Image (cartoon, rainbow, N blue to C red):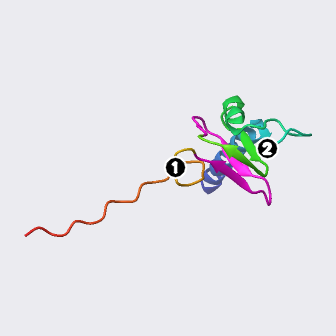
Amino acid sequence: MAKSVMFRRACAFLTSFLALTGALCASEVLVVAGAPGPGVDFTDLQSAVDAAENADVLLIKTGVYPAPVIVAKSLTLIADQNASVLVLSHGFDRHSFFPPIPAPDPPHPPSD
């Protein structure tokens, strides 16, 4: 009985592992850089997001990219090793992929 349970667990683990690695292998890596060049797929971050499929990876090289960047799919966005990536947010006081989170309202004094 114990061998049967161990065998089923091993099969379940192997099936999960193969499904995960298959999904990772199926994704594509798209390279985004501030200027065209060898190995660069896109020079505009939003264009790369729009062209990507679910589970793709966007490898972002050093550069300044305009915002907003709207991501409505399951992607992985990563900066290249030692890259300095800046996404300029228009109309916000921060530079990031997302608009700033507003500060909470200050507590109100207790009423009498």
Q: Main secondary structure of the magenta part?
A: loop
Count neighbours of disc 2 (C-alpha within 10 A) and say few if under 14, some if 14 to 19, many if 20 or more: some
At x 59%, y 40%, the residue is 68
- On the image, the x and y values in percent for residue 96 come to 60, 52
Q: Is residue 30 above or below residue 60?
A: above
Drawn side of residue 84 relative to residue 94, left or right: right
Q: Any magenta on residue 90?
A: no
Q: Nearer the viewer, residue 77 or 66?
A: 66
The front one of 98 and 4 is 98
> In the image, is residue 76 part of the stretch drawn in magenta?
yes
Residue 70 spot, x, y in % from top left: 58, 37
How far is mark 1 from mark 2, CA to CA?
22 Å
**Residue 90 vs residue 66: left or right?**
left
Q: Quadrant of residue 66?
A: top right
Q: Hey, what amino acid is under mark 1?
A: Phe
Q: Earlier in the sequence, mark 1 or mark 2?
A: 2
Q: Nearer the viewer, residue 82 or 52?
A: 82
> Residue 18 appears in which quarter of the rendering?
top right
Amino acid type at mark 2: Gly
Q: Which residues are magenta?
A: 69-89
Q: Secondary structure at mark 1?
A: loop
Name which residue lies at 55% across and 55% down.
Answer: 94
Element carrying mark 2: loop
Residue 14 can be seen, yes or no: no
Q: Along the horizontal axis of the image, is 71 left or right of 21?
A: left
Indicate which disc residue 34 carries.
Answer: 2
Give the labeled residue for mark 1.
92
